[in-house]
Amino acid sequence: MTAVQSLTVLGATGSIGRSTLDVVARHPDRYRVHALTAFHRVADLAQLCQQFQPRHAVVPTQDAATQLRALLVASGTHTSVLVGEAALAQVAAEADTVMAAIVGAAGLLPTLAAVKAGRRVLLANKEALVMSGALFMRAVREHGATLLPIDSEHNAIFQCLPASHAQGLAAIGVDKLLLTASGGPFREFSLEQLRTVTPAQAVKHPNWSMGQKISVDSATLMNKGLEFIEACWLFAARPDQIEVVVHPQSVIHSMVCYADGSVLAQMGQPDMRTPIAHALAWPERIKSGVPALDFATLSSLTFSAPDLARFPCLRLAQEAMAAGGTHPAILNAANEVAVAAFLAGELDFLGIPRVIEQVLREIPVSDGEELATILAADEAARLLASTLITQHMSQPGEG
């Protein structure tokens, strides 16, 4: 009989967190929730605590903690409430398995804490690898952590590779990794149409149910750019060994091309519970709640190259990875600020890549081997991006 695993979910109220708990609820004999964390959805977190009865819940501020404690007392839930970044790191280090699903750079430190504790880390926070790939993967090796990818594309590649892929792709007979991209909601838009895209349009992904930030990243193809960087680190791949292909149907989640001409593809419904269930149970398999594909009803599957002229964010990410050092951390920070400004109505859609490109040009680049260096580059990039956006808003006829 499989031993019960304790589980911490970092980012429990987000899309990935909720999908994780949906799978966990189907297997009460396998998983016990140790801790749940959230940033601002306190009422949602209280409901999840009532349902899953974790030992701890973590929120960012004392005000949020006071609100959460009141809700827990009212419902008779005995979960202890912890506050702040140190508490995030604590609960990440305590559980057998950690779902790292905090969006953005905020997820880096608690995810690293889980890695340094030698835990089984289910990585949905792509920014941890984008910002600190060399440092992060070194910590995985040094501390004996198990790292399992949750992004549907990386999970698909993981399923199509042999267990020995850490030694490099050439050593296992792999020529190329093919990352699939849906192309987002604006795949067919002209540049003129892209100029007038609204936040409400950008957050409506045609295939996937996702949070606002990742939905905008998907629309700009920055999400695929971040996944490109992440794939280089996860699979010890050079940038020239990874190709992005647009596949609007989101049925094939990624592919691996072998030296003998074989191509292995992982297919499934566009539902994150599939990769989550795979990683939770690996190397076993469990029910996810997702129905299998019905091949009799599938329409045609199509593929095309991405248009880097209309969607330059993918090019910027590929160039940042090739340049190395703190380039990817700077790219990520500038993107987070630009996307937040777009969602707030302070920046137009095409302004997102403009801001990122200017920040990449102006911020000095370091080697990126130390955490302090990475965090300093992140802070500098955020400050410059915010300044550029403020200048953009103050120009006549803009904002």
Image: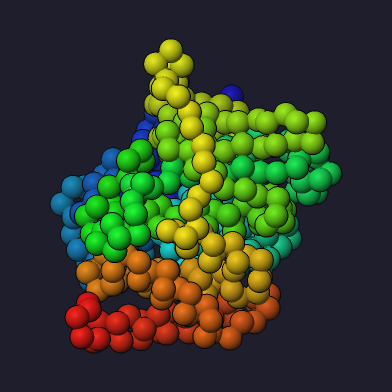
Q: Dividing the image into 4 quarters, which one contains the C terminus? A: bottom left
In the image, taking residue 285 as reference, residue 396 lies left or right, namely left
Between residue 60 and residue 206, name the one nearer to us.
Answer: 206
- Specify the color scheme: rainbow
Between residue 62 and residue 42, name the one nearer to us.
Answer: 42
Residue 262, how many percent across, how many down? 72, 29
Residue 89, how many percent across, how many down? 49, 64
Residue 87, how many percent across, how many down? 43, 66
Residue 392 vs 122, above or below: the answer is below
Looking at this view, name the residue that lies furthest to the top: 296
Q: Dividing the image into 4 quarters, which one contains the N terminus? A: top right
Residue 83, how many percent across, how many down? 35, 68
In the image, taking residue 144 as reference, residue 89 lies left or right, namely left
Between residue 380 and residue 119, name the one nearer to us.
Answer: 380
What residue sits 59% from the left and 62% below the top? 318
What residue sits 48% from the left and 74% below the top? 357
Looking at this view, name the residue that lies furthest to the left: 74
